Amino acid sequence: MNLNSQTDLTALDFEYQELEEEFKGLLELDDLDRVVSENPERVETFKSELKVSLSDAFKSAEGCPQAHLFLQRILYRINRLKLFWYDGLENYINEDSAFLFSLRMEIENTWQDWESGNTVQQKSGDLNIALGDRVEEDLQPEPSAEGLFIRNKISKSGYQRLLAITSLDGLVEASQLSRMLGGVGNEVQTMLTRILWEEYGSGKFSRKHSTHFATMLEECDLDSKPEAYFDLVPWEVLANINHSFFLSERKKNFLRYVGGLLYTEVSVPAAFQNIKMAGERLNMGDKGVSYWELHIREDIRHGQWMLDDVAFPLVEKYPEQGWDMVKGYDQQKFISSRATAAIVESIRQFENS
């Protein structure tokens, strides 16, 4: 089977393909804002169609999958300009574009309002207990249907597809965390920096987590270039990445970001154990599972650090606003679970094609 064959989950309809190509052309313009200012009619159709897609995506609890995919792809293309990809500097000529900023805000405001309806926010009780109970539950959860499918049933080609989809984030892992570290020094900042330092291999490229992911891809006969498999990624996975950008680019969302990171660090060991066991069952070799092995070992420690040395001190400093950490935790759990379900569905369709 061809790993790059598309399914209905990730293939844009022709109309959306045309709109995305139009947007990519705008990104490449020399001084996009000047062009839009002098020729506003050039973007009128795109802006009009964007509003239609926003309505289609968020008009109901489910919305239109094609509209979701289109919007999350557009948002990702804007957000990625916040990171440096060691490519041509001309690719960043519009990174501070007011037009792109307005598009990002229009998509994010509508999308985040819709996401807020997917979880119920707790705002009463003991905040430390609320966080501690969540961590205890997610450290060793009952295996989900998706986790059991990955562990016991996924084929070699399905495992490769899983790696391909998750490579979009895995090859630039922890990049959003780096954008949360600037500012006044304190114990919380120091611990977050320590976690980032370990994610980045303590300054050694060979030990950087993303390097392990690239090695794993190569061991499994996959392309290790960043974004090589962008067209395979379901909208739910893009939404997970874009949500991290949304939180990390706004300091008013600092506590929500911490809550989300707490869930990620706590939940990864159990989730990755299923993937590691699948790789071992499929005889992918040590390098073919090294990334999962590394995270299982390190994130148990990172989860405890996040709870004891980041979340609890922030509860003391922000006793009322600290409930934002619970909101961030619960939202990340929902968004991550939705992304995992979408990956498994993509694999099922691929294996049955």
Image (cartoon, rainbow, N blue to C red):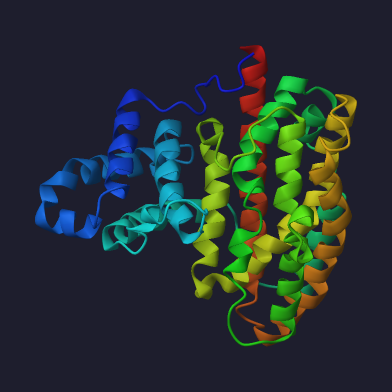
Quadrant where the N terminus sits is top right
Residue drawn at x 67%, y 21% is 348
Q: Is residue 48 above or below residue 4?
A: below
Residue drawn at x 58%, y 49% is 240
Residue drawn at x 63%, y 65% is 177
Q: In the image shown, does 96 or 18 lie closer to the viewer?
A: 96
Q: x and y percent of residue 233 in the render? A: 55, 35
Quadrant assignment, res 347? top right
Q: Is residue 292 left or right of residue 125?
A: right
Residue drawn at x 61%, y 12% is 353
Q: In the image shown, does 258 or 223 lie closer to the viewer?
A: 223
Q: x and y percent of residue 81 in the render? A: 44, 56
Q: x and y percent of residue 46 in the render? A: 23, 42
Q: x and y percent of residue 153 in the render? A: 81, 22
Q: Is residue 18 left or right of residue 86?
A: left
Q: Is residue 246 left or right of residue 261?
A: left
Q: Is residue 71 above or below residue 278?
A: below
In this rendering, does residue 127 appear at all? Answer: no
Q: In the image shown, does 12 or 95 lie closer to the viewer?
A: 95
Q: Is residue 333 left or right of residue 73?
A: right
In this rendering, does residue 165 appear at all? Answer: yes
